[in-house]
Amino acid sequence: MCDGIALESLRLMHTWLPAAVADGSDVAARSHMLAASAMAAVAFQKGLGAVHGLSEPVGAVHNSQHGLTNAILLPHVLRANRAAIEPKMDLAATYLGLPPPPPGYATTDGGFERVAAWLDTLAEQLQIPATLAEIGISDETAEECAAKAVANPTGFTNPLPFDAEMYSGVFRAAVEGRDRGRLQ
C-alpha cells in the first residue's frame, strides 16, 4: 500500500511542485502539494533509508537545513541503491510518464535514468544546489558523518545495507557533484 501511495505522491509533486514554488499564492498547487506531503508521510511507514540516515548527521555536524540536505543527497543515494531499486524506478517512470533521458545519461531503456533525469531537472528548476560544497560543506567530515549515519536507525530500512564506506562514498560524491546528470 505504501508503494502505491508514494507513487501518487510523486505524481502530484511532478505535476504541482514547480507551480507551487513559482507562485506561492497558487492555492490549487499548494493544496495538491499538501496532499502529496501527507501521502509521502504515510509512505514513510516503510522507512526512510540512507537519504535521511546520512542527512541527519550532516545536518547535526554542519547545521544544514534538513530538506535541502536531503535534496542534495537524493541523487547520490539513488545511484548507490540502483541494483535494489531499478524495478521500482521503472514503475515510477512509467507512472509519471517520464520521457527518455537526455544525452549524458545511461542509454538503457529502463526507468532509472528517466527518474534520475527528472530529479536532476527538477532540482535545477527549483534552484536546489547540486553539491554539498555549494552550501559550504567540504569532504573533511566524510568519515565522521558516515560513522554517525551507520549508527542512525533511520538508515536501517535502506534497500541495500550501507556501511561507513558506502556512506562516505555518497557523502564525497555529493560534495563533488560527481556523476550528477549521469546515473550510470
Image: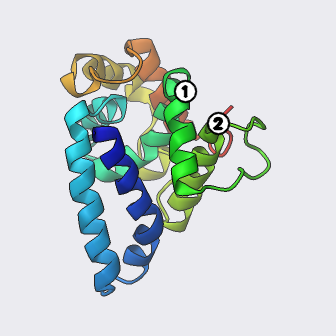
What's the residue at 35%, 52% (across, down)? 68
Q: Report the front residue among 26 and 5.
A: 5
Farthest-out residue, bottom: 25
Q: CA distance from mark 1 to mark 2?
A: 9 Å
Eyeballing the image, is 170 above or below 56? above
Label 2 packing within 10 angstroms: few (<14), some (14-19), many (20+): many
Position in image of residue 133 (x %, y %): 48, 45
Q: Which residue carries the number 2 mark?
A: 183
Q: Report the front residue among 60 and 104.
A: 104
**Which tag, 1 or 2, sits closer to the chain's start?**
1
User: Can residue 130 be seen at all in this image of the molecule?
Assistant: no
Q: How many marks?
A: 2
Residue mark closest to the camera, 1 vs 2: 1
Eyeballing the image, is 149 above or below 21? above
Are the residues flagged by discs 1 and 2 in contact, CB closer than 8 Å?
A: yes
Label 1 packing within 10 angstroms: few (<14), some (14-19), many (20+): some
Quadrant location, the N terminus: top left
On the image, which quarter does residue 25 sit in?
bottom left
Position in image of residue 64 (x %, y %): 29, 48
Position in image of residue 18 (x %, y %): 46, 71
Q: Which residue carries the number 1 mark?
A: 82
* Three-letter residue code for mark 2: Leu
Quadrant location, the C terminus: top right
What's the residue at 49%, 28% (across, down)? 85
Horizontal side, residue 109 vs residue 15: left or right:
right
What's the residue at 29%, 29% (across, down)? 53
Q: How is the image coloured?
A: rainbow
* Three-letter residue code for mark 1: Arg
Horizontal side, residue 18 vs residue 147: left or right:
right
